[in-house]
Image: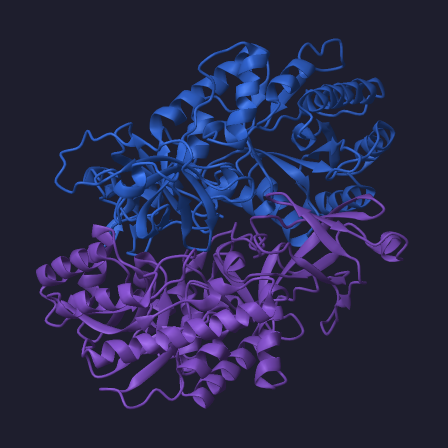
Chain colours: A purple, B blue
Amino acid sequence: MDRLLPDGGLALASLSEQLLQPGVKGLPLTEPMRQGAIGVQRWNVLRGDTGYPVALLKESALLHNLDWMHRFCAKHGAVLAPHGKTTMSPQLFGAQIANGAWGMTLATAAQVQVAYRFGVRRVLLANQLVAPAEIRAMLALMRDDPHFDFYALVDSEEGVHRLSRAAVAARLGRPLPLLVELGLSGKRAGCRTAEQALALARKVAKAPGLELAGIEGYEGLLHSHDRAGSLEAVRAYVAALADLVREADGKKLFGGDRILLSAGGSAYFDLVAHGFAGMRGLSRPVLPVLRSGCYLTNDHGFYQNLTQDVDEREKVSAGLRPALEVWSMVLSRPEPTLAILSMGKRDASHDMELPLALYTHRPDPEAAGGAEATALPPGCRVEKMNDQHAYLRLPEGDPLCDELKVGDLIGCGISHPCTTFDKWPLLLVVDDAYTVRYAVNTFF
Amino acid sequence: MDRLLPDGGLALASLSEQLLQPGVKGLPLTEPMRQGAIGVQRWNVLRGDTGYPVALLKESALLHNLDWMHRFCAKHGAVLAPHGKTTMSPQLFGAQIANGAWGMTLATAAQVQVAYRFGVRRVLLANQLVAPAEIRAMLALMRDDPHFDFYALVDSEEGVHRLSRAAVAARLGRPLPLLVELGLSGKRAGCRTAEQALALARKVAKAPGLELAGIEGYEGLLHSHDRAGSLEAVRAYVAALADLVREADGKKLFGGDRILLSAGGSAYFDLVAHGFAGMRGLSRPVLPVLRSGCYLTNDHGFYQNLTQDVDEREKVSAGLRPALEVWSMVLSRPEPTLAILSMGKRDASHDMELPLALYTHRPDPEAAGGAEATALPPGCRVEKMNDQHAYLRLPEGDPLCDELKVGDLIGCGISHPCTTFDKWPLLLVVDDAYTVRYAVNTFF
């Protein structure tokens, strides 16, 4: 986790040197503090040392997940370009690349600029580039740095025209590599049929300034309540992506010295890896690129359920662990079964499920450390959030209704890491005893 | 809008001087740029000059709303401590104070620290202070600056004990002024009955280091689909707050030279102003403090509906105007009635309603300016958002199904400003022709 990106050293070091002003969520500052000095404070979250709410990353779980996914990809002959939009944290990008990631996936031109600034030198932009300023910005990075390995998607003739014109005008000295996106009827972007995709691939191959580098899809949108049906649909879609590669290769449309074949969010990456394995006999090697972003922290809700299914399908134990928690304090105990927490929609994701109340602890400022949080009884749940408050409902008749006090801590897991990371400019990395080791920044 | 806070000048100037790096959402940067240089670029959003999505504030609407609310409060004999949590923007705090705001309301200790840093010198913290580090931080501000006028809420004996102990230990040289919160059964924080509130007020009045400065409540939680019932409940609650002031004053519990009586979110501030008017014959003057945060930008959804009701009740025309829009670009047109936009859950609020699709425009990079956006036909709506994408559904058979292209712009209104502001570190203030005048920062 402490290893830096090859070229990101200086920029990352500047984060460590920066003066944090009082007012950064979760930090207990009364004076400015250098970010790099956070670790030596030995703040302990269970002792009540920080501000609340505070967003935590458990270092042991991060390390486990980094290693787990690295081994998973190696075993299946795929490479990982984790979706950086999940965390938008340069320190975490660095940890991912130091742990074997082939590159980073990103969603917007602005995100690519942030990653580049902190040393990321291989990016798959998982969108069509359309806005003139954004096309210019990406081509400027490619032109100014011949070692910047950049790929983007395309799903329309308009996209091909814009990018071809701009790439020619930018005098890159090399083609802009594009992946044609095959989509899904009724879903998001992407060509709706293999025929459309093939026709577009032909246009890319012919267009000045461009190169057809591969084929891309996103199977994560196939999630539905019909689990077996979803799996079947994912397998069929993955097979269609592989077929499209074979067809386009048969027509000699690919440029470059390998073919990128990319899919794989955080729900079905195993099915993608299996579906993309063993592509041989083509004009050049096929490189399967998985793009999971949520594997790094997983969660206690939506993605945990999905990755437990992966464990089952792959027959592995000790799968991905939840690493992200938000801790808040009881601000008010206005009714026997109601506690108002110092955490709201601005602090924890609420788009898939509300935060999952897991632990409680009564902080003792005199404690030497080594305290352990207590699991909350079943039936405790966050039933509502306002902007800055959560409503924790306690099970009627449970002793906790008497015991839980103003000033007690509540530790919550979350469901959907992406929409929790974007609520925190800074998250604290803790050891298993909840002592703060260091901070990571985000750039949203 | 350009007037600064009395003591915030230097800190605000530092924002103007700061170098923005490429990668700030909405800005079309390829090189670092001083924030203060944004205005001279003459970027025009309709010409396609910026990055997309981009969050915009219409200056004319901001100025109108600042003036409208100032006149409203003056007319009703109330003062305004607008809730700063809505925007968390020091430049907008400055504009509010320059336009007559008595002080700022804030929700957390971290927010107070941000406001203080940028020159805000009167704060009502609309929560009970509980965490030790946060109590320490607020008392440190009071101790180090005798002119910092700070008020907080309390609704429990535990709160009184914590604050009394800490205030005595901090040797402030003056009492910490508290408002007792009267809540609502089944709702958020606050004492559940007037008796409990009065008993707590007595404890505050007696506690060393503390002073009872007033009574507080929040009527905004009484919103329901039964409009007449909601209004009735708000009026009764406001009356109960006023009664509590009279009772506590009869028992000589208040300290200081006036009594603060505070309520008033962005939905029913007129009812609060009426209910708090004309409180005379008490031991000291009563100062009604309204706290609306959303008045500044209003919106095109939830709050616009509510403030139109205010206009009706107050028999005024030309009420608050929506000032906040998020513009995005069509990334993909995969099906006749579907457009995929470059805007998602990370860019626009989705907790009350999804963004409201209002305008479209085909940007022409050669345009001299003066373009006008076209209103979208009825039936165009954002029907879903992912993290980074929105699904715009077009009405079947409408000419737009043929006309709308990749690269076209879509302008959306939002519903709930608070959860849009917190998605943008920087928002662009535009004139009525969508030319960018300057940027304001947020600190979440």
Viewer-proximal residue among B47 and B76: B47
Residue A179: x and y, percent?
27, 69
Would residue B98 appear left or right of B33 to someone viewing this image? Answer: right
Residue A312: x and y, percent?
62, 81
Quadrant in the picture for the C terminus of chain A: bottom left
Marker count (numbered): 0
Would residue A160 appear left or right of B103 to someone viewing this image? Answer: left
Residue A323 in sight here:
no
Viewer-proximal residue among B92 and B223: B223
Would residue A367 appear left or right of B94 to someone viewing this image? Answer: right
Viewer-proximal residue among B224 and A36: B224
Tell me the residue at 77%/60% (across/down): A362
Residue A197 position by quadrant:
bottom left
Tell me the residue at 40%/21% (across/down): B64
Residue B106 in sight here:
yes
Residue B53 sits above or below residue B433 on the image? below
Residue B246 position by quadrant:
top right
Residue A146: x and y, percent?
17, 74
Residue B72: x and y, percent?
52, 15
